[in-house]
Image (cartoon, rainbow, N blue to C red):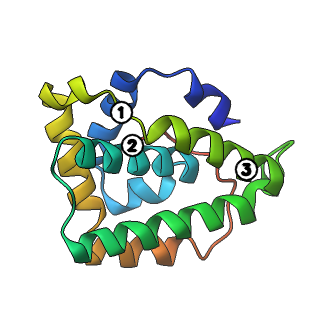
Amino acid sequence: MVSTRLIGRTYAVSLSIALCLTTASPARAEEASNYCFWTILVESHALAVACGKPLDLQSEQRFRRIRKALETAIIRDAPLSPGGSSDKARSAIRQDAQRLESPNPTSCATPDASNAIELLAQATTQDFEARLLSGLQTPKDPYAGDCL
């Protein structure tokens, strides 16, 4: 399961992965693991808040809708993963959210922080939200695919 692998990743590695999304095409994002994208989104949001660069109101509302839709799809589709279940996915989301929502404040001074905050801005546009929500309508193994 991707969540087990992600738990061991350091913050810097997660940010490096997130940077790849800034150049990913919509098709590439659709091929990505929903769980991986969820972790990147949550971590980037937490970093933006910690660094004093929160989203504007409309983008924040889109972030919340995207996050909820991803979580719903991950839980719905978890049984498609070998050995997966909705309960396991729900538990992994809860555990990983606690870790991801607590970034190291010293990370704000790194170039990766600026890139992660830019990633968040791109991932919370109206166009990206529409494409992502549309793609989530098709069930798929939430752990399968690239981690961007």
Residue lying furthest right in this view? Answer: 83
Question: Few, some or many C-alpha atoms within 10 Å of disc 3 (few <14, some 14-19, many ≥20)?
Answer: many
Q: Eyeballing the image, is 3 above or below 66?
A: above
Q: Position of residue 143 (x, y in %)?
A: 64, 45
Q: Contact (CB < 8 A) between labels 2 and 1?
A: yes
> Disc 1 and disc 3: Cα gap in Å?
22 Å
Q: In the rendered image, which residue does mark 2 sit on?
A: 43
For residue 13, what is the image quadrant? top left
Residue sitting nearer the eye, 82 or 48 = 48
Q: Residue at x 60, y 77 (%)?
A: 137
Q: Secondary structure at mark 2?
A: helix
The total of numbered circles placed on residues is 3
Of callouts 2 and 1, which one flags the residue occurring earlier in the amino acid sequence? 2
Q: Secondary structure at mark 3?
A: helix
- Disc 2 or disc 1, which is closer to the eye? 1
Q: Which numbered tag is attached to residue 103?
A: 1
The residue lying at 41 percent from left, 41 percent from top is 148
Q: CA distance from mark 2 to mark 3?
A: 18 Å
Expressed as whole percent of the image width and height from the top left, the position of residue 16 reads 31, 29
Q: Mark 1 or mark 3, which has the lower sequence index? A: 3
Q: Residues within 10 Å of mark 2 (few under 14, many from 20)?
A: many
Q: Dot 3 corresponds to which residue?
A: 89
Residue that appears at 50% across and 41% down? 146
